[in-house]
Amino acid sequence: MQHVKIPQDRIGVLIGEGGETLREIEEQAGIRLNVDSENGAVSIDEQADADPVRTLKGPDIVRAIGRGFAPEEALSLLDDEMMMFDLLDIDAVARNKNDLRRKKGRLIGEDGRTRELMEELTGASVVIYGSTLGMIGQPEQVQAVRDAAEMLLDGAPHGAVYSFLEERHNEIKRNELDYHRFPGSS
């Protein structure tokens, strides 16, 4: 059994209308969820006959929903064994509340453009919620978002980060083409 704590305002999203989302997560991931609505504690237990690879994704699905992802996006972690969820703690690199607000603003960009570009150029899903940046995607996609976010948090100009993302985008596309041309090689 594993335990995950999610923010109070995300409990309803995890449960869904009439418990529909909760049941869908349990069924697809092969887990049982017990949600404490008072404190946001979620205990996760695998079902006896479930696929162990799918049950391992259960805690990440719950964490992803807790960090602002829609349930459908969080469930995409089950689509492919290589899909992963990662979280960057913005608060850990902020000096104070104003610095946290400034750093989040750099990651979001004007009218959300920087966050959108991270998604468009990497193929990963990106959510900024509270003091975290969450990412769902293939390992190379998630790493590209993490690298770009860390560059922005370290004060790199947006233009330099956009150029970096363009390069990574082209690299990811080349790797995909090579993989499809020569299956089995990486």
Image (spheres, rainbow, N blue to C red):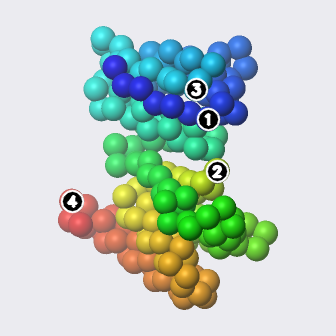
To which residue does mark 1 refer?
7
In primary-sequence order, the first of circles 1 and 3 is: 1
Dot 2 and dot 4 residues touching (CB under 8 Å): no
Q: Position of residue 119 (x, y in %)?
A: 58, 64
- List the single residue furthest toward the left: 185
To which residue does mark 3 refer?
40
Q: Which corner quadrant holds the C terminus?
A: bottom left
Real-space Cα separation, disc 3 to disc 4, in angstroms: 43 Å
Q: Secondary structure at mark 4?
A: loop
Real-space Cα separation, disc 1 to disc 3, in angstroms: 6 Å
Q: Residues within 10 Å of mark 4 (few under 14, many from 20)?
A: few
Callout in the foreground (3, 4) = 3
Q: Position of residue 97 (x, y in %)?
A: 66, 61
- List the single residue furthest toward the right: 111
In primary-sequence order, the first of circles 1 and 4 is: 1
Dot 1 and dot 2 residues touching (CB under 8 Å): yes
Q: Eyeballing the image, is 121 above or below 51?
A: below
Q: Which residue shows up at 30% across the image and 11% down it?
A: 48
Dot 1 and dot 3 residues touching (CB under 8 Å): yes
The label on residue 184 is: 4
Real-space Cα separation, disc 1 to disc 4, in angstroms: 42 Å
The amino acid type of the residue labelled 2 equals: Gly
Q: Position of residue 66 (x, y in %)?
A: 58, 37
Q: Which residue shows up at 21% across the image and 59% down it?
A: 184
